[in-house]
Every structure is written in C-alpha cells, then in structure tokens.
Image (spheres, helix red, strand yellow):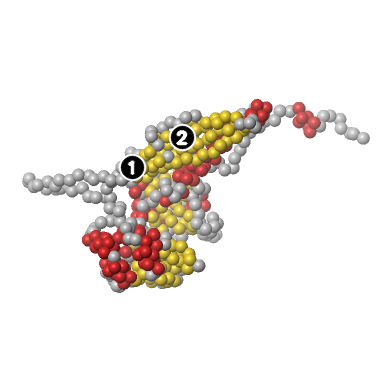
Amino acid sequence: MNDQTSLSPDAARQLATTTKTSPQMRGITPRYLLRALPWVDVEAGVFRVNRRRTYVLGDDRISIHNDGGSPRVIPGDLRELPYLRDADDALLSELAGSFTEVSFEAGQMLAQDGDAHDKLWVIAQGRAEKRVSGRYGEDAVLEVIGDGQFFDLDAWTRSEPLPYRVRALTPGVALCVERSVLEGLCERDTAVRGAMDAYLSADGMLPGAEVPVDLSSGHIGEPDLPATFVDYEDTPREYHMSLAQTVLRVHTRVSDLYNGPIDQIRAQSNLTAHALRERQEASLLNHPEFGLFNNVAPGQRVQARTGSPTPDDLDELLTRVWKQPGYFLAHPRAIAAFGRECTRRGVPPVIDNRFGSPLLSWRGVPLLPSDKVRFSGNAGVGTTEILLMRVGEAEQGVVGLRPAKVEDEVEPGLSMRNMGVDQKGITSYLMTAYFNTAVLVEDAVAVLQNVEVSNYYDYS
C-alpha cells in the first residue's frame, strides 16, 4: 500500500530547471609568470637583443653522464673550458677519458689553499664550499658549488697555488684530471697551445664582462683625453616566436542541439585556451632553448648552502639581481619550505597582495608560486630551483614576446581559426598561442639551485 500523500521531490525534480556552472578545470592555475611579465608586441616574428660586446670565457658547468653506474665527463661539454672551445672531438674524448673518480664524505677537505693545484676537480654529485681566511684571520665562505661545477680552472691552467680551500658539505663523487694531461695535449696540438696562451695573457677579464669604455675623470689642466667607442656584439641573439597549438573539434550536432544555456563552442575553446596558456607558462620556464631556467648566466647561479631555502639564500640571490629586483618564482613546495625556515628563525615573511592574492615576500620582493617549476628526482624528496628576475624593457630585464597581431585573434597572441566542416559533420578550429621570452641583460635573472623541500621542524 502506498502511504505517499504528496508529490515526491524525485518526481518534482523532473520538472525543475537546474542551475549549471560553466565547465570547471583543475589544471587551471593563476599563471603568475604570464601576469608579471611585461609583454612586447613583435611586429615581424623576430625579436633581436642588441648588447654591448662582452668577453665570453665559457660556462661554469661540465655535464656528467652515468656509464654503467660510473660518472663520466661528456667530451663535448669540455668546450666550456674557454681554450678548448675550438678543440677537435678526438682531443676532447682523450681528455674526458683521463678523468678519474674520487669519492668524498661530508666535512672532508678536498683541497687546501696555498697547495699546488695540479688537479681540476669536477663535482659529479654533491655540494662543497670554498672558504678563505679573512683580513683578520676569520673564516669566510666564498661560494657553494654543486653538480657539474669545477674548481679551480685558473689555478690549474697556470699551475699556481689554489687561492682558497674546498670542504665537502655532503657525501658525493668528483672527477679529477691531472695538470700533466693538459700539458701533453698542448705539446701535440698547437691550436690548443695558442688558445691557452691567449687565455693566460688575458689578465683581469671576467666571464661575461663588457668590453671597457676608456674614460678620464678627476683630471685638471689640459691633458689629452682618451678616445673611445662602445662596441656592439657582431651576432646579437634573435628570439623567434614559439607556439603551442592544437586542433579543437566540435560536432555540429552538439553545437546545434545542445548549445543552451551554455555555448558549447565557447566552453570548449575557453578550456582549450587555458590549456594552451598553461603549456605556454611551462615553456617559458623550462624550454631548453629560451626557458628562463636555462638562460641563467654562470655567475648568476647560486647553490643552496644547507639544502633548504633559507633567508640567507634569498639574500644571496638579491645580491645577483640587485638592480630593481621584481619577483621570485618558485614551486609552491619550495615557498612552503622557505616559510618553515623563516618560522624557525623567527623572521616571518611579510604578506604582499599582488594580482588579487596574498603572496609571501622577502625584502619586499614577492614570491610567485608556479607548479611548472621542475623537480630533479621525486617531487617529495627531490630538489628544485628558485628564480629571481628583474622585468621590463626599460629596466633591461625579462620581457615576454608575442605577435603584434594575428588573424582570428581571440586573446593577445592567441588565435582560433575555423578550418571548416568535414564529411562527418565535425567542425575543426586551429587554436594557436604564439609566445617567447627574452632576457635583455644577463644580470636580470639569477637562480638558486639544489633546493630541498622535505625538511620539517618540531616547534613545540
């Protein structure tokens, strides 16, 4: 027997109108990088960065690969040593094969200042610190070095005493090559000998330093004034438009019959545009050619001293981008790790409201979170990086690049072009986002490397 005396809610809902949301997408992020970059409209698809001529003396990294579990130097990457830049492949392979493996423990002294430096050390895995005695005998840290970095090229090449001592901070592995191997190569190859002699005679040239402008100041009377000019790079770097692209397909039956109250083509194109923008931000950070993390000059790379990102580490970054620093950019886990380090020291970061969100800041510079910042190893216990950048063309910083105008543009730099209807009644739309980014001057970006995010503390 049915005891129901009124219309049930389930039956009533058959006549009711539902209130719907537009399609939601978990992969949408704030994309702070795209919002923080000033965008330059590129007229002809190519953006050329003209710079003052600089001295190019090589990088500070030699790449290592594992061969059967043993680290080996990649021969071609030995061209990072300035006088081996034009050496032939056979010579580089011979030099790479001369490296021997050395293991070390935390706290071990790898080299002492004042000792004859007859080995070139390449850190394959681990961290070490360079230390010197200060003016009054105090112990001072010069630099922390990590994977791929080497010491000391100048002392090794000149066969002079090492100007600092090196102590391991973590267990690790290094590759070493004797000075006698270099001497043997120079005796057999006159081109290498000439390049090394040119390197040795170039006193006072720093990697990336600009060719000086001769000036006179503080003089009196009528001395002869120096004549000078500012030289430019012969082959300035050019940035071409990159792109993210896909074909969006919508059946005409769907757009004809099920287009209300939400426009199906608009909903589909909106979600696809978000996906393109997410890929755009990832490319601007990590692309091997123009990604910001891969375009940091050698002198602008800093190693985390203790692993976790500390206020000291971010202060060190600020010494590299001290001219109008704009933003830090890091993975949310790295920002959380930095917050824990600040809490541990009793120096909570100030909250800065930018882009409609509360953001942590350090020394007045906001930390922008992005899940596109890569991890080396497992994201839970691996290492990541923190970027600091100056932005703006007038500030000689980092700028975003996009076309001034494209056909069928729906957003700046993003087009949606109707490709027609096929025989199955499916309409195709070509969706393309054009973009790139340029670092106008090398000191506009710096990066903190080997940042660990898995350290937690008990504050009770």
**280 w.r.t. 293: above or below:** above
| Distance of label 2 from label 1 (alpha carbons) | 20 Å
Q: How many marks?
A: 2
**362 w.r.t. 166: above or below:** above
Q: Residue at x 28, y 56 (%)?
A: 206
Q: For this view, does 136 lie left or right of residue 226?
A: right
Quadrant of residue 6 within the rendered picture: top right
Residue at far right of view: 1
- Neighbour class for label 2 at 10 Å: few (<14), some, many (≥20)? some
Give the amino acid at mark 2: Gly
The residue that disc 2 covers is: 413
Mark yes or no: residue 398 visible.
no
Quadrant of image for the N terminus? top right
Q: Which mark is residue 49?
A: 1
Mark 2 secondary-structure assignment: loop
**232 w.r.t. 430: above or below:** below
Q: For this view, does 268 lie left or right of residue 126?
A: right
Q: Earlier in the sequence, mark 2 or mark 1?
A: 1
Residue 30: horizontal and vertical position, in percent? 51, 41
Residue 228: horizontal and vertical position, in percent? 17, 45
Give the amino acid at mark 1: Val
Q: Residue at x 52, y 32 (%)?
A: 416
Quadrant of image for the C terminus? bottom right
